[in-house]
């Protein structure tokens, strides 16, 4: 491992498992002529991760300009697609650094055309259709078709790359045959209107992968934008058994370990985050504190102890409280405990300046 191995808390990233997850998904999608664009936003576009994810990709995707800027500075050569619908205030920089973007507003498209014209560039766009999740996208198909026509005929510095949708986000709407078929029909309408085929019909994110695996994805869908399922091997619609769920491991050092009552002593008020909490009285038990907390990973429910007999009790900004009564062995200050991570805690940890990042199998 190439990092200061005596520094904690540590986030260990296994680049070989990451590469294998990407290859396994790419293989299965390629069989159905579906292209994968890897999304690096949750890994905070860490250069080692971005390099692995971008090795064979046509585009590397992120939602944030600061990550784009950093990837360019780090010499990541894969062209970048901005997947958060851009703000007018960032168009100049976006056009300078990103080759493509997701778009859903005609006034922003017109301003993007102007920015591209001023920089003498061609910028590719994917028009987003809202199919019920109520996040970004045109609501009426006719409106998207009109916008597509205007891009195609009147915006010489924009290239209409395709159409796409986003699901399983705000509205928790699951990708299914019905909404994917809706996107396929819309793509066909746009193609008829502009008189040529679209390169990309983007059927969503990690939660759409199950339709590739069970064979229910309509033929017309030829692109997915994948983050969680590559990074964590999980998605809200299933965790394929051929993927590694331990690309990321948190390693934290025990800073205190002793027997204490399991119920707080005194008058109960609010915790550090203003919440009323319930505590179970299990008598005197052995507890440990590791020095990593909510400021680093967000929610303590999103980290899972990997050693047996260790249970997360709760956390403050800087500490995680563990019940270690059933831990087989003698745990003491200086020992290291490991935790598996969800997508959410991975995203927080990759961006935390207090975390020491270590790469394995680079
Ligand atoms: C984050 C994001 C994705 C990737 O989502 P995952 O669930 O991580 O696969 C895809 N598209 C858009 C627009 C996103 O913002």
Image (cartoon, rainbow, N blue to C red):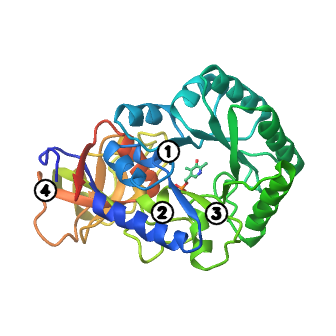
Residue 275 - label? 1
Quarter where residue 293 is shown: top left
Give left or right: position of 118 versus 272.
right
Pointers 1 and 2 in contact (C-beta within 8 Å): no
Q: Which residue is mark 2?
A: 229
Give left or right: position of 149 versus 308.
right
- The kind of secondary structure element at disc 4 is loop
Q: Estimate the spatial distance between the alpha carbons at disc 1 and disc 4, rounded to whole Å.
A: 31 Å
First along the sequence among labels 1 and 4? 1
Residue 222 - label? 3
Q: Estimate the spatial distance between the alpha carbons at disc 2 and disc 4, rounded to whole Å.
A: 31 Å
Quarter where residue 120 is shown: top right
Q: Is mark 2 within 8 Å of ligand 1?
A: yes
First along the sequence among labels 1 and 2? 2
Q: Residues within 10 Å of mark 4 (few under 14, many from 20)?
A: some
Q: Residues within 10 Å of mark 3 (few under 14, many from 20)?
A: many
Pointers 3 and 2 in contact (C-beta within 8 Å): no
Q: Residue at x 77, y 37 (%)?
A: 151
């Amino acid at each position: 491992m190439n990092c200061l191995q005596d520094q904690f808390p540590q986030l260990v990233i296994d680049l070989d498992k990451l590469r294998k997850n990407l290859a396994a998904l790419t293989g299965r999608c390629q069989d159905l002529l579906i292209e994968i664009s890897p999304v690096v936003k949750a890994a905070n576009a860490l250069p080692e991760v971005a390099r692995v994810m971008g090795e064979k990709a046509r585009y590397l995707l992120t939602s944030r300009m600061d990550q784009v800027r950093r990837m360019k500075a780090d010499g990541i050569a894969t062209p970048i697609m901005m997947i958060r619908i851009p703000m007018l205030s960032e168009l100049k920089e976006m056009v300078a650094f990103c080759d493509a973007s997701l778009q859903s507003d005609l006034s922003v498209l017109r301003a993007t055309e102007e920015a591209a014209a001023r920089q003498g560039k061609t910028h590719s766009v994917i028009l987003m259709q809202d199919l019920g999740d109520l996040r970004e996208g045109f609501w009426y198909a006719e409106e998207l078709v009109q916008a597509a026509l205007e891009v195609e005929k009147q915006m010489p510095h924009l290239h209409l790359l395709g159409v796409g949708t986003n699901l399983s986000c705000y509205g928790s709407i699951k990708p299914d045959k019905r909404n994917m078929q809706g996107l396929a029909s819309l793509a066909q309408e746009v193609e008829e209107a502009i008189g040529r085929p679209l390169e990309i019909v983007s059927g969503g994110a990690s939660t759409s992968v199950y339709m590739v695996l069970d064979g229910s994805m309509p033929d017309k869908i030829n692109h997915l934008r994948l983050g969680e399922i590559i990074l964590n091997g999980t998605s809200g619609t299933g965790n394929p058994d051929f993927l590694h769920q331990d690309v990321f491991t948190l390693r934290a050092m025990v800073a205190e370990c002793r027997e204490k009552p399991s119920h707080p002593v005194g008058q109960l008020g609010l915790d550090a985050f203003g919440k009323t909490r319930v505590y179970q009285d299990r008598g005197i038990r052995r507890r440990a504190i590791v020095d990593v907390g909510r400021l680093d990973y967000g929610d303590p429910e999103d980290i899972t102890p990997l050693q047996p007999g260790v249970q997360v009790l709760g956390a403050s900004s800087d500490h995680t409280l563990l019940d270690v009564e059933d831990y087989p062995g003698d745990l003491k200050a200086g020992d290291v405990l490991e935790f598996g991570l969800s997508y959410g805690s991975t995203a927080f940890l990759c961006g935390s300046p207090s975390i020491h990042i270590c790469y394995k199998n680079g």
